[in-house]
Image: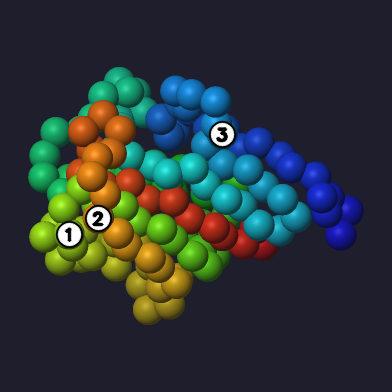
Amino acid sequence: MANEGKLTVVATDQAPRVIGPYSQAVKSGNLVFTAGQIPLDPATMKLVEGDITAQTEQVMRNLAAVLDAAGSSFAHVVKTTCFLANLDDFPAFNEVYARSFGDAPPARSTVQVARLPAGALVEVECVALVP
C-alpha cells in the first residue's frame, strides 16, 4: 500500500473545529480514526440546546462530516465508542444512533462517564474504513 505508515490529518469546517492539541481525525492506510464528537454546532461552537435526542443528532451530523472529509461514511464504520453522561439516556440515544447505521451496525462500546466536555450529554468516536 502506497501510504502505509503515513498519517494524514483530516480537517473540515463542517464539524466543530478542534479546541486543543488533537485532530478531528487521522487517516492511516485505509483506516480513519475520529476524535470524539460532542454536540457542538460547527457554526457557533456552542453546545446545541435540547435533550439527549437533539444532542445525539448533532453528534452524528458532526461525525458524518468528519467521516466524509476523510473519504468515508457511516456505511464503513467498524467500531464506535460512545460516552453518555447518564446511561438512563441510552434508549433515546440508541434510537438516533441506530438511524445512522441501519441494518449493519458496527461493533460498539457504550459507557457512562462522570463528565463530558462543555457539559455535553453524549460523545461518540469511531474507526472506519476508507474505501
> Measured from the top left, where is residue 13 in percent x and y?
48, 28
Amino acid marked by disc 2: Gln
Instruction: Give the residue pinned by disc 1.
Output: 87
Q: What percent of the width, then of the height, locates residue 79?
A: 49, 65
User: Do the numbered discs 1 and 3 sit on residues whose CB atoms are within 8 Å?
Assistant: no
**Residue at far right of view:** 2
Q: Tell me how far mark 2 sits from mark 1, CA to CA.
A: 6 Å
Q: Which mark is residue 67?
A: none
Q: Amino acid at mark 3?
A: Ser
Residue 92 in sight from this viewpoint: no
Q: Is the residue marked by circle 3 packed among few (<14), some (14-19), or many (20+) residues within 10 Å? A: some
**Residue 34: percent from left, percent from top:** 52, 47
Q: Is residue 71 left or right of residue 36?
A: right
- Determine whether the residue tagged by mark 2 lies in a helix, strand or loop: strand
Earlier residue among tags 3 and 2? 3
Q: Are marks 2 and 1 in contact (CB under 8 Å)?
A: yes
Query: What residue sits 67% from the left and 47% below the top?
Result: 27
Q: Which mark is residue 23?
A: 3
- Going by the image, does 95 lie left or right of 1? left
Q: Earlier in the sequence, mark 2 or mark 1?
A: 1
Dot in front, 3 or 2 = 2
Q: How is the image coloured?
A: rainbow
Indicate whether 23 appears above or below 3.
above
Res 109 visible? yes
Q: Residue 112 bears which disc, if any?
A: 2
What residue is at 61 percent from the left and 37 percent from the top?
Answer: 10
Nearer-the-camera pick, 13 or 109: 109
Residue drawn at (23%, 45%) of the image? 114
In terms of image quadrants, where is residue 51?
Answer: top left
